[in-house]
Image: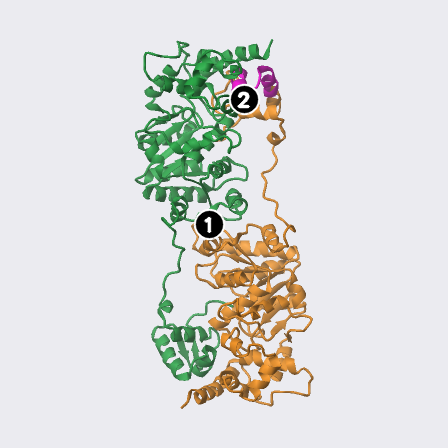
Chain colours: A green, B orange
Amino acid sequence: MTNHALNFALTNLALMADAIGSGGGAAGSEVIADGNGDRERLARAGLSRVVEPGDLAALKAFDGMSALEIWDRLQCRSHGLERWSTRLAEVDPERDLERAAAAGARFVIPGDDEWPDPIDVLTDAGQLSRRAGAPFGLWVRGRANLRHALKRSVSVVGARACSSYGEHVAAELSAGLADSGVTVVSGGAFGIDAAAHRGALAAPGTTIAVLACGVDVSYPKRNSALLSRVAEEGLVVAELPPGCSPTKLRFLARNRLIAAATQGTVVIEAAIRSGALNTAGWAEQCGRAVLAVPGPVTSRMSAGSHLLVRERNAVLATNVADIIEAISPYGAGLTQPPRAPQSVADTLDADLQRTLDAVPVLHPAPAPRIAVTAGLDLLTTQQSLDALAALALITQTPTGWRLPSPPGGA
Amino acid sequence: MTNHALNFALTNLALMADAIGSGGGAAGSEVIADGNGDRERLARAGLSRVVEPGDLAALKAFDGMSALEIWDRLQCRSHGLERWSTRLAEVDPERDLERAAAAGARFVIPGDDEWPDPIDVLTDAGQLSRRAGAPFGLWVRGRANLRHALKRSVSVVGARACSSYGEHVAAELSAGLADSGVTVVSGGAFGIDAAAHRGALAAPGTTIAVLACGVDVSYPKRNSALLSRVAEEGLVVAELPPGCSPTKLRFLARNRLIAAATQGTVVIEAAIRSGALNTAGWAEQCGRAVLAVPGPVTSRMSAGSHLLVRERNAVLATNVADIIEAISPYGAGLTQPPRAPQSVADTLDADLQRTLDAVPVLHPAPAPRIAVTAGLDLLTTQQSLDALAALALITQTPTGWRLPSPPGGA
């Protein structure tokens, strides 16, 4: 049995399975619907089922062809494309579009007002390693305009099995970002992803979940309520057509979308080898900002974040301002380095400051001693000491002056 | 009353006060003891009491002079040096050396086998801002050889009011450093300093406390037991002569010594404006490694460490290896970036890996479907699935194959 024949056989089985998996019988009707004018949309919808997300072989085979050309070549079973054309028999884009519509989803393709151009960076396969390539289209649930929502956006990603610290920080930062008009993008998983969506939903902002399965598939099941809320208030997006379920390859391919679609990726708690670091790697390759939130060095969960800062020059992110600075054009939205609160001592003139600095914390010293240490004359020192005492910054004892409360040690 | 006369008057008072402060009557005897041949040591001992640590005015006034020249000029009341010569009357270096000896301390000066040359970087006043200048000598308590002890050394500094996290990390890292033959240097204060000394004392290594007061002064008092242990097992060092008590200026001057004497400064928990950041600033100016240990972004105490990494290019330190790498010559003692533990899946060949990656986490899929996703022929896929099942990496269900436990979400 030739490989080709075998492929053909197994593909028919495969697409029956797809049908089972997506819980509906394939219609098997004629694919090209000239009835509706939108041939390109149909072609891309079909290709989104025929070609696995980020399939590099496809990227090579179809290099330079338009979606319609690819589609037509597959129709006429062009030589060398069997791997994909053998899947056509059971593909029905019209039905997928109907199923999407029934699930309140639409299929967005390049050229649509909603298409987020930034992800086209993924078509530059030369620069990008395996599982690259831009999607043929995006299946989108939700009212918001995808391109607008992504204009100012950050992906917040991290461990599923995160700590309560990670969950807290993810929710806080995401709420702050949403509050500042930055869309939060994440994967809809447990842990950091869910905390990020929840945090953003709690604020008057947008959040987007990019899934590794169909937009009508609730995965993980226990997040289905959260995902419906995301779809109501924000957007649920997928590269895979309705009914598809996730595989590891699809998770990895999904990560490239999250990274490419946003201006920066913030990693909060990630194990050394994790999906979050994979997303950070994609952000790096796509020329997006990569940020990592530090945590206790005693926590395994922060090891990935610290690795990013140490080994891959990720920006250390400690608050919303740090993140906004990283995704803003130079000069815009710069972080003010944190400052200590102003204390009375900050308002002292030079003489008062020098005098204060010369007052012992341990054994009280008389004015003359302090004058010598401060390098000031006795008169100035006397006046300064009185002023400092009036400010309650020093106290007088029988044997001289000292600081009221010792700072606690050398 | 002229400024000069005033200075003279106040200085006499001052030194009476010094005597009170140091709890003993000044002998007022002739200072230069030609009887003992060590005129330079006496001169430097005297200067260590006459000149405040890091007094820039002195650094300028005495520029280019040897210690003996300075001492002699002060003896003959040379014009322009009144600020210091007026203090001579009550200075008695022989007595200070005796007091030091009585306290089990010695006075180490340049040229001594024990002198730590690295701190001579502080004489390069051009490069360094206020409060620079190398000490005239160092008062040292303890059996170890100061220069040898500092050959491979790191200062571990941080907040007095640190968190239990900071205390834990300071003790752990210091124990690890001491274990690796790196001397831990700190200030003997509460909080991080004390934890660092304790951690180092718990390991078979050396720890050094550099004080901002006399080596015979226990400050802070509640650390006196700890400081005596440090003196027994390591070294207690001070620039100030016996009996002197700390002032803020002396703390700041002390920080420059800690930074200059060690190969790197590790900051663990520091407020935005703190002695620890001051020490880090000195380390930077002296060309030493500056490292910061991250912590929870929700903790004020870690704000200073994160600031160092974000704004001042400090190295993020998460473990002992990171610190040793930073103080080691290039190529030596490099950190191995942390790796995830090897799992069975890491040992799979390419086909098994691709097959495994193509197995759904949600709806089980039959072999043909998986073959398509994996891009492998059915035969290979079948064999791979059987092998993966044997490894318990996948499970078979009536409707096909799936991962045993879903990772938890997209």
Q: Name the residue under label 1.
A: B296
In the rendered image, residue A272, in percent from the top left (x then y), is placed at 54, 40
Residue B52 appears in the figure: no
**Residue A51 numbered mark, or none:** none
The residue sitting at 64% across, 78% down in the picture is B101
Q: How crowded is mark 1: few (under 14 residues within 10 Å), some or many (20 or more)?
A: many
Q: Magenta segment, which residues?
A: B366-385
Disc 1 is attached to a residue of which chain? B
**In the drawing, does residue A407 fall left or right of residue B393?**
left
Q: Which amino acid type is marked by label 1? A: Pro
In the rendered image, residue B72, in percent from the top left (x then y), is placed at 59, 85
Callouts 2 and 1 close, C-beta under 8 Å: no
Would you identify the image quadrant in which residue A187 lies?
Answer: top left
Task: Assign the magenta stretch its main secondary structure.
Answer: helix
**In the drawing, does residue B165 fall left or right of residue A188?**
right
Nearer to us: label 2 or label 1: 2
Would you identify the image quadrant in which residue A118 lies?
Answer: top left
Q: Which amino acid type is marked by label 2? A: Ala
Seen in the picture, residue B85 relative to A139 is either above or below; the reply is below
